[in-house]
Structures are given as C-alpha cells and as structure tokens.
Amino acid sequence: MLAGSSSPQCWNCGGPGGPTREDGFLCPQCRVLQPPDPTRDHFSLMDCKRSFNVDTAKLQHRFQQLQRLVHPDFFGQRSQTEKDFSEKHSTLVNDAYKTLLAPLSRELYLLKLHGIEIPEGTDYKMDNQFLMGIMDINEKLAEAESEAAINEFESIVREKQKELTDNLSRALEQDDFEKAKEILTKMRYFSNIEEKIKLKMVPL
C-alpha cells in the first residue's frame, strides 16, 4: 500500500512498502500500482501544506504529475486490479484538485479536517442587514439587461469575494474558526450570485 498505510505490503508481490519513488503509488519491487491510502487527505495527496493559502501553480503542476502517473489511459494493458485502482486514484486526484483550487471549497474542506462542518443553505449568524443586501443585489441583477450592467455586478462581487477571502485568511491565521464559519457562509451567498451572473452572460 501507500506510504503511511497500516499494511504496507504490496498486494501483488508481498514486498515491503514504505517511502518509495512516485510517492508510494507503485511498488518499488514489482512496479505495480497500489491501492489508494484511505488516511491520506487532499493536502497530503496534492503535496500542499495544510493551509488556506495554496500555491495554485504548484497545485496544477502536481495534478498534472499525478494524472500522468495514475490516469486509467495508462493502465489499459494492465491487470483488472490495477485498472480498478487507477480509476480510484484518478477520481481522488480530480476531487482533491478541484477542492483545493477554489478558495471556498478549499476552506470548507480545511474546516472539515478540523471537525467543523457548515451545512448547505445555513444562515449561520447572518444579520438582517447582510441578508437584505444580498436580496437587493439579486433583485437588481435580475433586472439587469445590458452587458455593461452585468459586468458591473461581476466586478462588485469579485471585489467582495476578494475582501472576504482576505478576512478569511486572517481569521484562520488566528485560529478563529467561528469567524471563519461566518465568512464562509457569506462567501457562499456571493458564490451563488456569481453563478447567476454567469448564466446572465450566456447568450440565449
């Protein structure tokens, strides 16, 4: 299995595991693909520090590196067991990449690793003034017809998300997870508006 697994013997040749080339994905003796390590989190898999601030260029490079190593296209002539492991590895790599690439999903995942989860649709500590502001943006966006007006909303929301992202980074540096939950909930509202803006920009 992978490095760090409780049972590191290779399923194919029975050889010992431990730190190996290619991050332990392949047995160092028989070079056969090993099963995914269920204890490995996304940050470890993508070779990133467990932090809100992630080097996205490095993340993309790691994603491409791992896909060249475990993608099912490279296991077409291998055993069915390796094909199955390849599918699982590839899915895990895709999920990890997508999760860590976007600030919102990255932070939700980071909080989850700390035992903190925010249910979908929660209005966690949202004051009426904030909610009224969101309603106002949604109403005005629905009425917007011109490309200039829609672009203006896009700019406003992008700037607001940047501000929230900066605030979130500071909250995490101080281990203030309650504040982080509040900021993340606000980011979800603005992410929903971003999706609506994208739909408005698609030509009918």
Image (cartoon, helix red, strand yellow):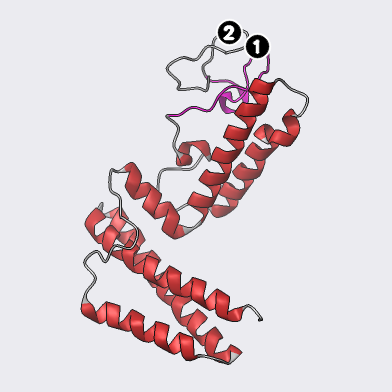
Outermost residue on the right side: it is: 77
How far across and how far down the image is residue 154, in percent?
Answer: 51, 80
Give the magenta range.
Answer: 19-38
Q: Quadrant of the C terminus?
A: bottom right
Residue, disc 2: 15
Q: Is residue 23 left or right of residue 49?
A: right
Q: Main secondary structure of the magenta part?
A: loop
Which kind of residue does numbered mark 2 sit on? Gly
Viewer-nearest residue: 166 or 145: 145
Q: Are marks 1 and 2 in contact (CB under 8 Å)?
A: yes
Q: Tell whether 77 sits left or right of 178.
A: right
Judged from the image, the secondary structure of the residue bearing numbered disc 1 is loop
Q: Which residue is mark 1?
A: 29
Question: Whole-Å distance between the Cαs marked 1 and 2?
Answer: 7 Å
Q: Position of residue 92 (x, y in %)?
A: 54, 39
Asked if 43 appears above or below 22 in the picture, the reply is: below
Q: Position of residue 202 (x, y in %)?
A: 63, 77
- What residue do we see at 29% from left, 62% from top? 122
Please state which amino acid type lies under the numbered disc 1.
Gln
Residue 77 forms part of the magenta stretch = no
Q: Is residue 31 above or below residue 153?
A: above
Q: Residue at x 49, y 58 (%)?
A: 102
